[in-house]
């Protein structure tokens, strides 16, 4: 069998998942794997070790070939059209049997038109069932059509629902199929032996309560909401708290972020590392902090940060609704807030300051191991 591993994204968890799938290739020496990736992969691949495998090859395309994050419906359709047309031709020329993708939704709706030879296995992150009461009629209808297309066309071999067994079962029931399959969200163990003392390095007093917000930051991550909450702190709280932002700040919030930061930086300690950070640095942040901030607006999907909360025993502050709220509540990973207003966030900050929370256990990590993720991927590719 020939498997094409395609991703037009290599940032954040996408690189992690690609490395896990590389290990899946090592588990399948009788199959051939081709990784078709943007050229920017070459710049970030050294974050992991890729031992040479005789059954794996790499091929690359220009980063500008496809949109990273289409923001309008017309852009999404255009991106899907270009990706499916390109992969339809590529899979035919290279006699591909299965296409695996970290991002299944880009194959909707044009895969049935262009991809004739191969079958697709891909991951779904945002599960609309968790926000059905909040969606507009238009968005609700569009989501239902997307899932209907995936359920009824044979080109979609397996649709992997990330970290949500209940939704996978519900979707199979709704669409009378067995294509929707649960996929654990793989927790990446961070190496605590390589940590640095963040508090010493950035002159953060041990007496201060340290809140960290890291990874890719954009409008959906609640990054701006955190700064708005900082603005509303009392003078006493501003002197007792430190806020640490680490990761690339997206263009959609960059101007507003720095406008707020400039107004606040002289009144409260805020550290900003606006760049891609390595995993050792994230481990250092988790070791040093009192809480991890995840006030996400998009709660209908999982977050890799809750795995860090489980490993390091540090609570997250997260919305109570959606899949994210369900997971934090189920595994007791931190403090749940009803909304991401400054008042709700400040109330949670006070609870962290006063240790009014139960430290997260390792149970979430145990249920979301990398080995389990790889086994599910292998099983669904071979299904």
Image (cartoon, rainbow, N blue to C red):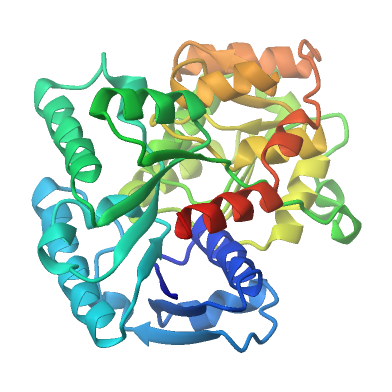
Single out the residue that lies furthest toward the right.
193
Seen at 52% across and 77% down, the residue is 31
Q: In the figure, is residue 144 to the left or right of 292?
A: left
Q: In x, y percent, where is residue 39?
A: 41, 83
Q: Is residue 27 visible?
A: yes
Q: In the figure, is residue 199 to the left or right of 58?
A: right
Seen at 42% across and 57% down, the residue is 102
Residue placed most toward the observer, 191 or 355: 191
Seen at 48% across and 53% down, the residue is 380
- In what quadrant of the picture does the N terminus appear? bottom left
Give the number of callouts: 0
Q: In x, y percent, where is residue 47?
A: 65, 72
Q: In the figure, is residue 211 to the left or right of 174?
A: right
Q: Is residue 276 visible?
A: no
Please, is residue 162 above or below residue 68 in the view?
above
Residue placed most toward the observer, 5 or 119: 119
Please, is residue 240 above or below residue 289 in the view?
above
Q: In x, y percent, where is residue 377?
A: 53, 55
Q: In x, y percent, where is residue 211?
A: 68, 33
Residue placed most toward the observer, 215 or 326: 326
Please, is residue 353 above or below residue 86 in the view?
above
The quarter holding residue 7 reads bottom left
């Amino acid at each position: 069998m020939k498997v094409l591993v395609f991703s037009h994204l290599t940032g954040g968890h996408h690189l992690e998942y690609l490395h896990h799938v590389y290990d899946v290739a090592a588990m399948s020496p009788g199959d051939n794997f081709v990784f078709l990736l943007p050229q920017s992969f070459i710049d970030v691949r050294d974050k992991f070790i890729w031992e040479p495998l005789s059954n794996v090859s790499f091929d690359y395309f220009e980063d500008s070939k496809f949109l990273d994050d289409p923001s309008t419906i017309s852009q999404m359709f255009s991106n899907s059209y270009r990706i499916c047309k390109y992969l339809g031709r590529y899979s035919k020329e290279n006699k591909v049997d299965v296409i695996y993708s970290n991002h299944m939704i880009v194959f909707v709706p044009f895969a049935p038109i262009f991809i004739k030879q191969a079958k697709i296995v891909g991951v779904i992150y945002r599960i609309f069932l968790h926000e059905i009461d909040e969606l507009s009629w238009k968005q609700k209808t569009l989501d239902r059509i997307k899932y209907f297309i995936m359920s009824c066309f044979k080109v979609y071999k397996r649709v992997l629902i990330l970290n949500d067994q209940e939704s996978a079962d519900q979707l199979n029931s709704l669409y009378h199929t067995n294509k929707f399959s649960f996929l654990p969200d793989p927790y990446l163990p961070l190496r605590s032996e390589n940590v640095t003392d963040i508090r010493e390095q950035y002159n953060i007093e041990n007496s201060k309560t340290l809140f960290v917000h890291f990874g890719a930051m954009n409008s959906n991550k609640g990054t701006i909401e955190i700064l708005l909450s900082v603005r509303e702190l009392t003078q006493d709280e501003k002197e007792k708290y430190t806020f640490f932002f680490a990761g690339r700040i997206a263009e959609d919030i960059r101007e507003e972020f720095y406008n707020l930061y400039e107004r606040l930086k002289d009144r409260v300690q805020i550290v900003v590392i606006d760049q891609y950070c390595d995993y050792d640095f994230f481990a250092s942040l988790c070791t040093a902090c009192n809480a991890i901030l995840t006030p996400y607006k998009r709660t209908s999907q999982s977050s890799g940060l809750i795995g860090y909360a489980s490993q390091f025993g540090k609570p997250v502050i997260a919305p109570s609704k959606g899949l994210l709220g369900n997971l934090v509540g189920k595994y007791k990973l931190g403090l749940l807030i009803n909304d991401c207003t400054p008042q709700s966030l400040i109330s949670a900050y006070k609870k962290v300051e006063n240790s009014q929370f139960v430290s997260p256990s390792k149970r979430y990590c145990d249920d979301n191991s990398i080995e389990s993720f790889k086994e599910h991927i292998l099983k669904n590719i071979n299904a």
